Image (cartoon, rainbow, N blue to C red):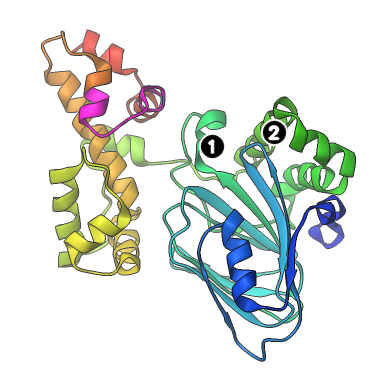
Amino acid sequence: MSPSVFHPDALRKYRLFESSDLDETRESISRVMQPHALRPTGRAEGTSHMDFVKVGRLGLGTIAFGSDMHVDVESVDGYYLLMFCLSGRALARTRGTTLQVDRYNGILCRPGHSFDAMLSDHCEQFVLRIDAHAFVSVLGEEPSRIAAHLPVGGPLLRGWMEQLRTLTGSTDLLESARAHPRIAAHMEHLLIELLSQSGTLTPSADAVDLVRGSSARPAGIAPAFVVRAEEFVRAHSADALQLQDIAAAAGVPARTLRDGFQQFRNMTPMQFVRDTRMAHARQTLLRSDGHVRISDVALECGFFHLGRFSLAYAKAFGESPSDTLRRR
């Protein structure tokens, strides 16, 4: 069954706003997504609306602008953004990839990356935001590699689409999931597992590279600003680094930095931060005298949640931090 018959009728009960004012539209969407730029590409006519509901750590919604619109998000913050069209079409771009988005082809943007889309007149989008922590809870860590293209009309995602269709098409089910945390957690878990098992999330090579001592996979000689950013991260990896901090140290805009890392290191700057911290943690454990506390090492290396650190460490190196201490 294809998304041509995807009718999220249950979402219509959760109308967030209707407005013909562009500023009000922008502010209303920003409250549940994040700040972004909206620029009409033709005459700004028609009424915009958004339906939106939270189910655990998922946010499900529809957005329509009533006219051609350019949406520009500098950096998706803390969640995965999935979008396809219920009607109309869009030309969307993320991670250096430009895609035609419609009823059969969606786009998936990961945290820390830019997203922009040129939406056709009468385009209504279905949007799904998945908090990054939800991936960690269900899969053990955030997926390191995700294809930007999401074939929502193909066989790989048939089971996932069927579950999404059921949730957004049943008023009673959606209200139960919204009102009861255990039901919400079940729906969240099922949708993430189905997405993971579909084959659209590609395996990570980061763990192998970390064990070999190099998390970067060069694609030619990197420009000087990438090298400056790497040196800054290595010197300040334990600090609470943000993308803007690294970009400022490298002397380039955040988007230029992201594109440079994607092209020459095949990762984002924040992935490089994570890998640098993880490599530092492993070296600290291997060189310790056996009396060090794992929680202290995690904090020293910039990890402030011990459970997540342990899960990510085991995923990267095939053993727990305590196993590394025992065999150092």
Asked where in the image residue 263 lies, by quadrant, the reply is bottom left
* Residues rendered magenta in the picture: 297-311
Q: Is residue 151 above or below residue 56?
A: below
Kind of residue at badge 2: Leu
Q: Label 1 amino acid?
A: Phe
Figure quadrant of residue 210: top left
- Image side of residue 95 versus residue 289, left or right: right
Quick one: SS at disc 1? helix
Decide whether residue 94 is among the magenta residues. Answer: no
The residue that mark 2 highlights is: 190
Q: Between marks 2 and 1, how big is the CA–CA gap?
A: 11 Å
- The residue carrying mark 1 is 135
> Mark 2, residues whose alpha carbon is within 10 Å: few (<14), some, or many (≥20)?
some
Quarter the C terminus occupies: top left
Determine the residue positioned at 34% across, 19% down.
Answer: 319
The image shows residue 13 at horizontal and vertical percentages of 84, 53
Name the spot of residue 108 as percent of width and height, x first. Answer: 57, 56
User: Closest to the observer: 234 or 148?
Assistant: 234
- How many badges with numbers are in the image? 2
Residue 228 placed where, x, y %? 14, 59
Q: Is residue 3 visible?
A: yes
Label 1: few (<14), some (14–19) or many (≥20) C-alpha neighbours in 10 Å: many
Res. 104 in view = no
Q: At 33% from the left edge and 35% from the top edge, which residue is drawn?
A: 208
In front of the other: 75 or 152: 75
